[in-house]
Amino acid sequence: MSIIDIINKKRNSQELSKEELEFAFNGYIEKKVTDYQMSALLMAICINDMTDKEVFDLVDIFIKSGDTIDLSSIEGVKVDKHSTGGVGDKTTLIIAPIVASLGIKVPKMSGRGLGYTGGTIDKLESIPGFKVDLTKEEFLKELGDIGMVVCSQTSSLVPLDKEIYSLRDVTGTVESIPLIATSIMSKKIASGADKILIDIKVGTGALIKNDRDAKILRDLMIRIGTAYNKEVRCIISDMDMPSGFCVGNALEVAEAAELLNGKIKNDLYDLCVDIASNMVSMGKEISIIEARDQVIEAIETKKAYAKFIEFINYQKGNIEAMNVSNNKMEITSVQEGVITAIDAYKVSEVSCKLGSGKLTKEDVIDHTVGVFLNKQVGDSVSVGDTLCTLYYNKVKEDFDVIKAFSIQ
Ligand code: URA
Protein backbone atom coordinates (compact mmCIF):
# COMPACT_ATOMS: atom_id res chain seq x y z
CA MET A 1 0.00 0.00 0.00
CA SER A 2 1.26 3.51 -0.69
CA ILE A 3 0.06 6.88 0.59
CA ILE A 4 0.34 8.31 -2.92
CA ASP A 5 -2.04 5.65 -4.29
CA ILE A 6 -4.46 6.46 -1.44
CA ILE A 7 -4.33 10.21 -2.18
CA ASN A 8 -4.83 9.53 -5.91
CA LYS A 9 -7.79 7.24 -5.19
CA LYS A 10 -9.54 9.91 -3.11
CA ARG A 11 -8.66 12.58 -5.66
CA ASN A 12 -10.45 10.41 -8.24
CA SER A 13 -13.53 10.19 -5.94
CA GLN A 14 -13.13 6.49 -5.19
CA GLU A 15 -14.13 5.02 -1.83
CA LEU A 16 -11.20 4.20 0.49
CA SER A 17 -11.18 0.90 2.36
CA LYS A 18 -10.75 0.76 6.14
CA GLU A 19 -7.22 -0.60 5.63
CA GLU A 20 -6.34 2.38 3.43
CA LEU A 21 -7.75 4.85 5.96
CA GLU A 22 -5.81 3.11 8.74
CA PHE A 23 -2.65 3.19 6.66
CA ALA A 24 -2.99 6.93 6.05
CA PHE A 25 -4.26 8.16 9.45
CA ASN A 26 -2.40 5.78 11.78
CA GLY A 27 0.63 6.35 9.55
CA TYR A 28 0.28 10.09 10.14
CA ILE A 29 0.28 9.75 13.92
CA GLU A 30 3.26 7.37 13.65
CA LYS A 31 5.00 10.03 11.52
CA LYS A 32 5.27 7.68 8.51
CA VAL A 33 2.93 9.94 6.53
CA THR A 34 4.12 13.53 6.23
CA ASP A 35 2.19 16.77 6.85
CA TYR A 36 2.09 17.54 3.12
CA GLN A 37 0.78 14.08 2.23
CA MET A 38 -1.94 14.24 4.89
CA SER A 39 -2.80 17.80 3.79
CA ALA A 40 -3.29 16.55 0.22
CA LEU A 41 -5.50 13.71 1.42
CA LEU A 42 -7.58 16.04 3.64
CA MET A 43 -8.05 18.43 0.73
CA ALA A 44 -9.13 15.54 -1.53
CA ILE A 45 -11.66 14.55 1.19
CA CYS A 46 -12.83 18.15 1.44
CA ILE A 47 -13.44 18.36 -2.28
CA ASN A 48 -14.77 14.84 -2.97
CA ASP A 49 -16.57 14.08 0.32
CA MET A 50 -16.70 10.66 2.01
CA THR A 51 -19.22 7.84 1.94
CA ASP A 52 -20.96 6.81 5.18
CA LYS A 53 -18.80 3.69 5.30
CA GLU A 54 -15.62 5.76 5.09
CA VAL A 55 -16.84 8.13 7.85
CA PHE A 56 -17.84 5.25 10.16
CA ASP A 57 -14.45 3.58 9.58
CA LEU A 58 -12.63 6.85 10.25
CA VAL A 59 -14.58 7.48 13.49
CA ASP A 60 -13.51 4.01 14.67
CA ILE A 61 -9.87 4.71 13.76
CA PHE A 62 -10.01 8.06 15.62
CA ILE A 63 -11.53 6.53 18.76
CA LYS A 64 -8.98 3.70 18.80
CA SER A 65 -6.09 6.19 18.55
CA GLY A 66 -6.36 6.80 22.32
CA ASP A 67 -8.13 6.06 25.59
CA THR A 68 -11.85 5.98 26.18
CA ILE A 69 -13.59 6.96 29.41
CA ASP A 70 -15.85 4.50 31.20
CA LEU A 71 -18.56 6.37 33.09
CA SER A 72 -20.45 3.26 34.21
CA SER A 73 -19.27 3.72 37.82
CA ILE A 74 -21.26 6.97 37.99
CA GLU A 75 -24.95 6.53 38.70
CA GLY A 76 -27.61 8.07 36.48
CA VAL A 77 -27.90 9.19 32.89
CA LYS A 78 -24.93 11.13 31.52
CA VAL A 79 -25.69 13.73 28.85
CA ASP A 80 -22.84 15.49 27.04
CA LYS A 81 -23.01 18.59 24.86
CA HIS A 82 -20.89 19.94 22.03
CA SER A 83 -21.02 23.03 19.88
CA THR A 84 -19.51 23.27 16.42
CA GLY A 85 -18.05 26.58 17.57
CA GLY A 86 -19.05 30.18 17.32
CA VAL A 87 -18.39 33.73 18.41
CA GLY A 88 -19.32 34.60 22.00
CA ASP A 89 -20.46 31.03 22.51
CA LYS A 90 -20.53 30.66 26.29
CA THR A 91 -23.46 28.22 26.29
CA THR A 92 -21.58 25.37 28.03
CA LEU A 93 -20.99 27.57 31.09
CA ILE A 94 -24.72 28.21 31.34
CA ILE A 95 -26.23 24.91 30.25
CA ALA A 96 -24.10 22.48 32.23
CA PRO A 97 -25.11 23.95 35.64
CA ILE A 98 -28.79 24.16 34.63
CA VAL A 99 -28.90 20.51 33.54
CA ALA A 100 -26.80 19.27 36.49
CA SER A 101 -29.02 21.18 38.95
CA LEU A 102 -31.91 19.07 37.61
CA GLY A 103 -30.16 15.82 38.51
CA ILE A 104 -28.64 14.86 35.15
CA LYS A 105 -24.92 14.20 35.03
CA VAL A 106 -22.98 16.43 32.64
CA PRO A 107 -19.45 15.16 31.87
CA LYS A 108 -17.92 17.78 29.60
CA MET A 109 -14.49 17.92 28.10
CA SER A 110 -13.94 21.16 26.26
CA GLY A 111 -11.40 22.72 23.96
CA ARG A 112 -9.53 25.95 23.52
CA GLY A 113 -10.28 28.58 20.90
CA LEU A 114 -9.55 27.78 17.28
CA GLY A 115 -9.09 30.53 14.74
CA TYR A 116 -11.57 33.26 15.58
CA THR A 117 -13.95 31.06 17.60
CA GLY A 118 -13.44 31.10 21.37
CA GLY A 119 -12.95 28.02 23.54
CA THR A 120 -14.63 27.20 26.86
CA ILE A 121 -11.30 26.34 28.48
CA ASP A 122 -9.85 29.78 27.68
CA LYS A 123 -12.97 31.35 29.19
CA LEU A 124 -12.69 29.29 32.39
CA GLU A 125 -9.04 30.28 32.72
CA SER A 126 -10.20 33.90 33.20
CA ILE A 127 -11.21 32.81 36.70
CA PRO A 128 -8.14 33.03 38.97
CA GLY A 129 -7.18 29.61 40.35
CA PHE A 130 -9.62 27.63 38.17
CA LYS A 131 -8.18 24.19 37.44
CA VAL A 132 -8.85 23.07 33.86
CA ASP A 133 -6.56 20.03 33.76
CA LEU A 134 -7.98 17.12 35.71
CA THR A 135 -6.88 13.50 35.95
CA LYS A 136 -9.39 10.81 34.97
CA GLU A 137 -9.93 10.09 38.69
CA GLU A 138 -10.59 13.78 39.48
CA PHE A 139 -12.98 13.97 36.53
CA LEU A 140 -14.99 10.98 37.74
CA LYS A 141 -14.96 12.14 41.38
CA GLU A 142 -16.30 15.60 40.53
CA LEU A 143 -18.99 14.13 38.28
CA GLY A 144 -20.08 11.83 41.11
CA ASP A 145 -19.85 14.56 43.80
CA ILE A 146 -21.59 17.51 42.13
CA GLY A 147 -23.09 16.05 38.94
CA MET A 148 -21.06 18.08 36.46
CA VAL A 149 -17.53 18.73 35.35
CA VAL A 150 -16.02 20.91 32.63
CA CYS A 151 -12.33 20.41 32.00
CA SER A 152 -9.72 20.32 29.29
CA GLN A 153 -9.70 17.32 27.02
CA THR A 154 -6.93 14.94 28.12
CA SER A 155 -4.20 14.39 25.55
CA SER A 156 -4.84 10.63 25.63
CA LEU A 157 -8.42 11.04 24.37
CA VAL A 158 -8.57 10.83 20.56
CA PRO A 159 -5.01 12.11 20.01
CA LEU A 160 -5.52 11.67 16.27
CA ASP A 161 -8.16 14.42 16.32
CA LYS A 162 -5.74 16.81 17.99
CA GLU A 163 -3.11 16.20 15.28
CA ILE A 164 -5.52 16.29 12.36
CA TYR A 165 -7.38 19.35 13.66
CA SER A 166 -4.21 21.45 13.93
CA LEU A 167 -3.35 20.48 10.37
CA ARG A 168 -6.88 21.23 9.10
CA ASP A 169 -6.73 24.59 10.83
CA VAL A 170 -3.83 25.72 8.65
CA THR A 171 -4.64 23.95 5.37
CA GLY A 172 -8.12 25.25 4.58
CA THR A 173 -9.71 21.90 5.43
CA VAL A 174 -11.65 22.75 8.58
CA GLU A 175 -14.96 23.21 6.78
CA SER A 176 -15.47 19.62 5.64
CA ILE A 177 -18.67 17.93 6.81
CA PRO A 178 -17.29 14.35 7.10
CA LEU A 179 -14.17 15.64 8.88
CA ILE A 180 -16.21 17.77 11.31
CA ALA A 181 -18.55 14.83 12.02
CA THR A 182 -15.59 12.48 12.59
CA SER A 183 -13.83 14.95 14.87
CA ILE A 184 -16.86 15.69 17.05
CA MET A 185 -18.39 12.23 17.24
CA SER A 186 -15.12 10.40 17.94
CA LYS A 187 -14.49 12.68 20.94
CA LYS A 188 -18.06 12.45 22.21
CA ILE A 189 -18.14 8.65 21.93
CA ALA A 190 -14.69 8.28 23.54
CA SER A 191 -15.75 10.44 26.49
CA GLY A 192 -18.43 7.96 27.44
CA ALA A 193 -21.75 9.83 27.83
CA ASP A 194 -24.99 7.93 27.15
CA LYS A 195 -26.64 10.76 25.24
CA ILE A 196 -25.27 13.68 23.27
CA LEU A 197 -26.68 17.09 22.33
CA ILE A 198 -24.93 18.94 19.52
CA ASP A 199 -25.45 22.62 18.83
CA ILE A 200 -24.69 23.20 15.13
CA LYS A 201 -23.92 26.86 14.59
CA VAL A 202 -24.72 28.33 11.18
CA GLY A 203 -23.70 31.73 9.85
CA THR A 204 -20.84 34.15 9.23
CA GLY A 205 -19.27 33.42 12.63
CA ALA A 206 -19.46 29.63 12.26
CA LEU A 207 -17.77 26.82 10.34
CA ILE A 208 -21.08 25.89 8.70
CA LYS A 209 -22.36 28.70 6.53
CA ASN A 210 -25.82 27.50 5.42
CA ASP A 211 -28.82 25.44 6.58
CA ARG A 212 -28.39 22.79 3.90
CA ASP A 213 -24.90 21.87 5.15
CA ALA A 214 -26.10 22.04 8.77
CA LYS A 215 -28.80 19.46 8.01
CA ILE A 216 -26.35 17.16 6.21
CA LEU A 217 -23.98 17.37 9.22
CA ARG A 218 -26.87 16.80 11.66
CA ASP A 219 -28.10 13.67 9.85
CA LEU A 220 -24.59 12.27 9.57
CA MET A 221 -23.83 12.76 13.29
CA ILE A 222 -27.14 11.14 14.26
CA ARG A 223 -26.30 8.13 12.06
CA ILE A 224 -22.86 7.82 13.67
CA GLY A 225 -24.38 8.06 17.17
CA THR A 226 -26.94 5.38 16.34
CA ALA A 227 -24.16 3.05 15.19
CA TYR A 228 -22.59 3.41 18.67
CA ASN A 229 -25.92 3.09 20.50
CA LYS A 230 -25.91 6.72 21.59
CA GLU A 231 -28.93 8.97 21.37
CA VAL A 232 -27.87 12.12 19.53
CA ARG A 233 -29.99 15.24 19.16
CA CYS A 234 -28.87 18.29 17.24
CA ILE A 235 -30.17 21.79 17.26
CA ILE A 236 -29.26 24.25 14.53
CA SER A 237 -28.66 27.78 15.83
CA ASP A 238 -27.90 31.11 14.22
CA MET A 239 -24.35 32.47 14.29
CA ASP A 240 -24.64 35.45 11.96
CA MET A 241 -24.26 37.69 14.99
CA PRO A 242 -22.39 36.96 18.22
CA SER A 243 -24.24 35.03 20.92
CA GLY A 244 -25.26 37.46 23.68
CA PHE A 245 -23.60 40.79 24.48
CA CYS A 246 -20.00 39.79 25.16
CA VAL A 247 -17.05 38.45 23.20
CA GLY A 248 -13.84 37.88 25.19
CA ASN A 249 -13.02 35.47 27.96
CA ALA A 250 -13.72 37.14 31.36
CA LEU A 251 -16.52 39.22 29.81
CA GLU A 252 -18.21 36.01 28.68
CA VAL A 253 -17.87 34.28 32.06
CA ALA A 254 -19.42 37.35 33.71
CA GLU A 255 -22.26 37.29 31.18
CA ALA A 256 -22.88 33.57 31.82
CA ALA A 257 -23.02 34.22 35.58
CA GLU A 258 -25.45 37.12 35.11
CA LEU A 259 -27.72 35.05 32.90
CA LEU A 260 -27.81 32.23 35.46
CA ASN A 261 -28.51 34.85 38.11
CA GLY A 262 -31.67 35.80 36.21
CA LYS A 263 -30.42 39.19 35.07
CA ILE A 264 -30.37 38.63 31.29
CA LYS A 265 -33.17 37.55 28.96
CA ASN A 266 -31.98 37.75 25.36
CA ASP A 267 -31.23 35.53 22.34
CA LEU A 268 -28.57 33.75 24.38
CA TYR A 269 -31.10 33.01 27.14
CA ASP A 270 -33.52 31.53 24.58
CA LEU A 271 -30.79 29.40 23.03
CA CYS A 272 -29.61 28.10 26.41
CA VAL A 273 -33.16 27.25 27.48
CA ASP A 274 -33.61 25.40 24.19
CA ILE A 275 -30.40 23.37 24.50
CA ALA A 276 -30.85 22.63 28.21
CA SER A 277 -34.49 21.57 27.64
CA ASN A 278 -33.36 19.09 25.00
CA MET A 279 -30.71 17.68 27.34
CA VAL A 280 -33.17 17.38 30.23
CA SER A 281 -35.77 15.83 27.93
CA MET A 282 -33.20 13.23 26.82
CA GLY A 283 -31.87 12.64 30.35
CA LYS A 284 -35.28 12.25 32.02
CA GLU A 285 -37.11 10.89 28.98
CA ILE A 286 -39.79 13.58 29.29
CA SER A 287 -41.32 15.92 26.72
CA ILE A 288 -39.50 19.10 25.72
CA ILE A 289 -42.38 21.15 27.16
CA GLU A 290 -42.06 19.50 30.58
CA ALA A 291 -38.28 19.82 30.44
CA ARG A 292 -38.56 23.49 29.51
CA ASP A 293 -40.67 24.24 32.60
CA GLN A 294 -38.04 22.60 34.79
CA VAL A 295 -35.20 24.48 33.08
CA ILE A 296 -36.89 27.87 33.53
CA GLU A 297 -37.64 27.04 37.16
CA ALA A 298 -33.99 26.08 37.76
CA ILE A 299 -32.93 29.52 36.47
CA GLU A 300 -35.64 31.47 38.27
CA THR A 301 -35.10 29.80 41.64
CA LYS A 302 -31.29 30.32 41.25
CA LYS A 303 -30.77 26.55 41.61
CA ALA A 304 -28.72 26.63 38.41
CA TYR A 305 -26.70 29.64 39.59
CA ALA A 306 -25.91 27.84 42.87
CA LYS A 307 -24.68 24.84 40.84
CA PHE A 308 -22.48 27.16 38.74
CA ILE A 309 -20.85 28.58 41.88
CA GLU A 310 -20.46 25.09 43.35
CA PHE A 311 -18.71 23.96 40.15
CA ILE A 312 -16.36 26.98 40.03
CA ASN A 313 -15.45 26.49 43.71
CA TYR A 314 -14.97 22.73 43.24
CA GLN A 315 -12.37 23.40 40.53
CA LYS A 316 -10.69 25.97 42.83
CA GLY A 317 -11.75 29.08 40.92
CA ASN A 318 -12.21 32.42 42.67
CA ILE A 319 -14.85 34.19 40.63
CA GLU A 320 -14.79 37.26 42.91
CA ALA A 321 -11.19 37.84 41.83
CA MET A 322 -11.94 37.72 38.09
CA ASN A 323 -11.17 40.97 36.25
CA VAL A 324 -12.02 42.69 33.03
CA SER A 325 -9.72 45.45 31.84
CA ASN A 326 -10.29 48.97 33.21
CA ASN A 327 -9.34 50.44 29.82
CA LYS A 328 -12.45 51.02 27.76
CA MET A 329 -13.05 52.60 24.37
CA GLU A 330 -16.60 53.38 23.28
CA ILE A 331 -17.34 53.10 19.57
CA THR A 332 -20.15 55.41 18.53
CA SER A 333 -22.47 55.43 15.57
CA VAL A 334 -21.84 57.88 12.74
CA GLN A 335 -25.25 57.32 11.25
CA GLU A 336 -28.87 57.13 12.29
CA GLY A 337 -31.10 54.13 11.63
CA VAL A 338 -31.83 50.57 12.70
CA ILE A 339 -29.14 47.91 13.19
CA THR A 340 -29.89 45.18 10.65
CA ALA A 341 -26.83 42.97 11.27
CA ILE A 342 -23.77 42.60 13.49
CA ASP A 343 -21.13 40.50 11.75
CA ALA A 344 -19.97 37.86 14.23
CA TYR A 345 -16.79 37.15 12.33
CA LYS A 346 -15.71 40.81 12.30
CA VAL A 347 -16.44 41.26 16.02
CA SER A 348 -14.41 38.19 16.92
CA GLU A 349 -11.58 39.30 14.64
CA VAL A 350 -11.37 42.58 16.58
CA SER A 351 -11.61 40.79 19.92
CA CYS A 352 -8.78 38.45 18.90
CA LYS A 353 -6.62 41.38 17.80
CA LEU A 354 -7.17 43.00 21.20
CA GLY A 355 -5.72 39.78 22.65
CA SER A 356 -8.68 37.56 23.59
CA GLY A 357 -7.61 34.84 21.16
CA LYS A 358 -4.43 33.61 19.54
CA LEU A 359 -3.38 34.82 16.12
CA THR A 360 -0.23 32.68 16.23
CA LYS A 361 0.50 29.57 18.29
CA GLU A 362 2.94 31.59 20.43
CA ASP A 363 0.49 34.36 21.41
CA VAL A 364 -0.54 34.61 25.05
CA ILE A 365 -4.24 35.19 25.67
CA ASP A 366 -5.31 38.30 27.61
CA HIS A 367 -8.40 37.11 29.46
CA THR A 368 -9.46 40.63 30.45
CA VAL A 369 -10.04 42.11 26.98
CA GLY A 370 -12.87 41.85 24.47
CA VAL A 371 -15.93 43.50 23.00
CA PHE A 372 -19.21 44.39 24.73
CA LEU A 373 -22.11 44.98 22.35
CA ASN A 374 -24.14 47.91 23.68
CA LYS A 375 -26.62 47.50 20.84
CA GLN A 376 -28.23 44.45 19.29
CA VAL A 377 -29.83 43.72 15.92
CA GLY A 378 -33.19 45.55 15.69
CA ASP A 379 -32.14 48.44 17.94
CA SER A 380 -32.57 52.01 16.65
CA VAL A 381 -29.52 54.24 16.88
CA SER A 382 -28.78 57.96 16.58
CA VAL A 383 -25.48 59.59 15.66
CA GLY A 384 -23.21 59.45 18.73
CA ASP A 385 -24.89 56.43 20.38
CA THR A 386 -22.49 53.79 21.67
CA LEU A 387 -22.57 50.70 19.47
CA CYS A 388 -20.00 48.70 21.39
CA THR A 389 -17.30 49.05 23.99
CA LEU A 390 -13.80 47.67 23.51
CA TYR A 391 -11.90 46.47 26.58
CA TYR A 392 -8.20 46.68 25.83
CA ASN A 393 -4.78 46.53 27.46
CA LYS A 394 -1.66 46.48 25.33
CA VAL A 395 -3.35 47.19 22.01
CA LYS A 396 -5.36 50.40 21.85
CA GLU A 397 -6.93 50.41 18.42
CA ASP A 398 -10.54 50.18 17.23
CA PHE A 399 -9.62 47.86 14.29
CA ASP A 400 -12.57 49.29 12.37
CA VAL A 401 -15.09 47.38 14.51
CA ILE A 402 -17.74 49.80 13.24
CA LYS A 403 -17.69 47.82 9.98
CA ALA A 404 -19.29 44.92 11.86
CA PHE A 405 -22.52 46.96 12.20
CA SER A 406 -24.97 47.28 9.31
CA ILE A 407 -27.28 50.22 9.92
CA GLN A 408 -30.15 51.17 7.58
N1 URA B 1 -15.54 21.10 16.59
C1 URA B 1 -14.76 20.01 16.65
O1 URA B 1 -14.54 19.45 17.71
N2 URA B 1 -14.25 19.53 15.50
C2 URA B 1 -14.48 20.09 14.31
O2 URA B 1 -13.98 19.60 13.30
C3 URA B 1 -15.29 21.23 14.27
C4 URA B 1 -15.81 21.73 15.43
Image: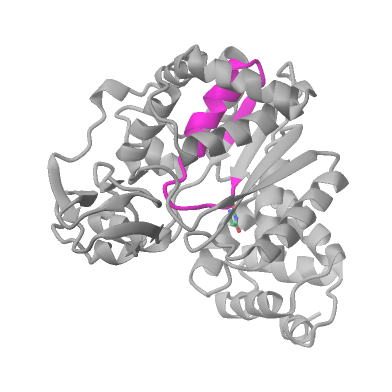
- Indicate yes or no whether the magenta region holds residue 100: yes
Q: What residue is shown at x 64% (from left), y 57% (from top)?
A: 160
Specify whether 351 is left or right of 210. Answer: left
Residue 217, given in percent of the width and then of the height, sits at 71, 59
323 over 47 or under it: above or below: above
334 over 262 or under it: above or below: below
Q: What residue is shown at x 85% (from left), y 45% (from top)?
A: 226
**What color scheme is it?**
one colour
13 over 155 or under it: above or below: below
Quadrant of the frame with the N terminus: bottom right
Q: What residue is shown at x 40% (from left), y 52% (from top)?
A: 377
Specify whether 380 is left or right of 213. Answer: left
Query: Which contiguous range is marked in magenta?
Result: 83-108
Camera-side residue: 5 or 408? 408
Residue 251, given in percent of the width and then of the height, sits at 31, 39
Residue 130, visible in the rendered structure: yes
Residue 76, given in percent of the width and then of the height, sits at 74, 18
Camera-side residue: 55 or 369? 369
Quadrant position of ligand 1: bottom right
Residue 300, given in percent of the width and then of the height, sits at 49, 16
The picture quadrant where one finds residue 405 is bottom left
180 over 266 or under it: above or below: below
Quadrant of the frame with the C terminus: bottom left
Q: How many marks?
A: 0
Specify whether 279 is left or right of 312. Answer: right
Q: What residue is shown at x 71% (from left), y 49% (from top)?
A: 185
- Indicate yes or no whether the magenta region holds residue 92: yes
